[in-house]
């Protein structure tokens, strides 16, 4: 049975946290890690940034091979970061134990993660690897996703939870539908494409944490 851990980690304790400078009131939501060849490319939303200026700051990092501005809408921007995740002790420990990132947000000098592992042994090994690499973890909660007290968001990010809740309230999932994604997106102040991706990832996360038991889930999914 899978197990989910909610934890915090200082930004200075893992390489991705050091790459993404969150000073000046910037916050980020990590969307996913997508495998590209032998690498895993992080995609993340940055809030409260100038799109090109922030991309320039990221490109200045010596360990970053490239940055792509994928979407820019008002005060939030979606980036793709070409960088070798294997150099990150924390994320490498997650991947080595077949972990899956359900939620990851960063602000100030700290990141919050919600991670899913195949079992408690994998979680224990992950924590040991982090300790060996001097990565300081503050574990808030550990639970099984099939338990009734698994939490009100079931791994959803704040933005995914907000989008799904509004879509339901506006009747997007009614039969027949009472609205479309353009109307829901307008209420949230985001693009139609951003909403569609947010709903898709949110539903996938809900399914993984409720109706499905997936011990083989991986970080790159």
Image (cartoon, rainbow, N blue to C red):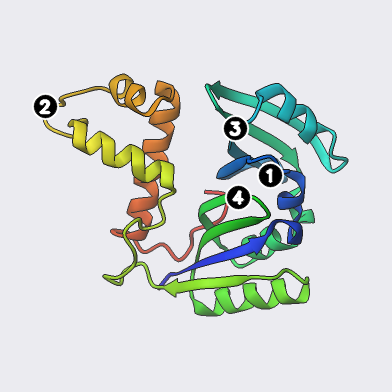
Q: Nearer the viewer, residue 112 or 142?
A: 112
- Front tag of 4 and 3: 3
**Tag 4 or tag 2, which sits nearer the N-term?**
4
**Tag 3 or tag 4, which sits nearer the N-term?**
3
- Report x, y in % for residue 62: 88, 40
**Tag 1 or tag 2, which sits nearer the N-term?**
1
> CB atoms at circles 4 and 3 under 8 Å apart?
no
- Report x, y in % for residue 198: 42, 36
> CB atoms at circles 2 and 3 under 8 Å apart?
no
Q: CA distance from mark 4 to mark 3?
A: 13 Å
Looking at the image, residue 150 lies above or below residue 88: below
Q: Which residue is mark 4?
A: 106
- Front tag of 2 and 1: 1
Q: Residues within 10 Å of mark 2 (few under 14, many from 20)?
A: few
Looking at the image, residue 62 lies above or below residue 91: above
Q: CA distance from mark 2 to mark 4?
A: 39 Å
Q: Which residue is mark 1?
A: 22
> CB atoms at circles 3 and 1 under 8 Å apart?
no
Q: Nearer the viewer, residue 52 or 23?
A: 23
Q: Residues within 10 Å of mark 3 (few under 14, many from 20)?
A: some
Q: Secondary structure at mark 2?
A: loop
Q: Which residue is mark 2?
A: 176
User: In the rendered picture of this protein, how many numbered marks are placed on residues?
Assistant: 4
Q: Secondary structure at mark 4?
A: strand
Residue at image position (69%, 62%) is: 90
């Amino acid at each position: 049975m899978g197990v989910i851990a909610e934890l915090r980690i200082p930004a200075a304790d893992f390489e991705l946290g050091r790459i993404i400078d969150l000073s000046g009131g910037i916050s980020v939501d990590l969307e996913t890690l997508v495998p590209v060849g032998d690498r895993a490319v992080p995609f993340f939303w940055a809030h409260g940034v100038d799109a090109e200026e922030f991309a320039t700051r990221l490109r200045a990092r010596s360990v970053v091979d490239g940055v792509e501005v994928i979407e820019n809408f008002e005060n939030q921007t979606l980036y793709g970061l070409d960088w070798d995740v294997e150099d990150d002790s924390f994320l490498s420990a997650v991947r080595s134990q077949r972990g899956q990132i359900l939620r990851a947000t960063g602000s100030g000098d700290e990141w919050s993660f919600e991670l899913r592992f195949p079992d408690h042994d994998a979680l224990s090994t992950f924590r040991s690897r982090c300790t060996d690499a001097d990565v300081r973890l503050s574990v808030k909660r550990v639970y099984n996703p099939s338990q009734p007290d698994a939490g009100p968001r079931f791994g959803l990010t704040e933005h995914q939870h907000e989008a799904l809740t509004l879509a339901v309230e506006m009747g997007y999932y009614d039969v027949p539908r009472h609205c479309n994604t353009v109307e829901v997106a307008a209420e949230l102040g985001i693009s139609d494409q951003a909403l569609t991706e947010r709903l898709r990832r949110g539903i996938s996360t809900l399914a993984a944490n409720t109706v499905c038991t997936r011990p083989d889930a991986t970080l790159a999914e």
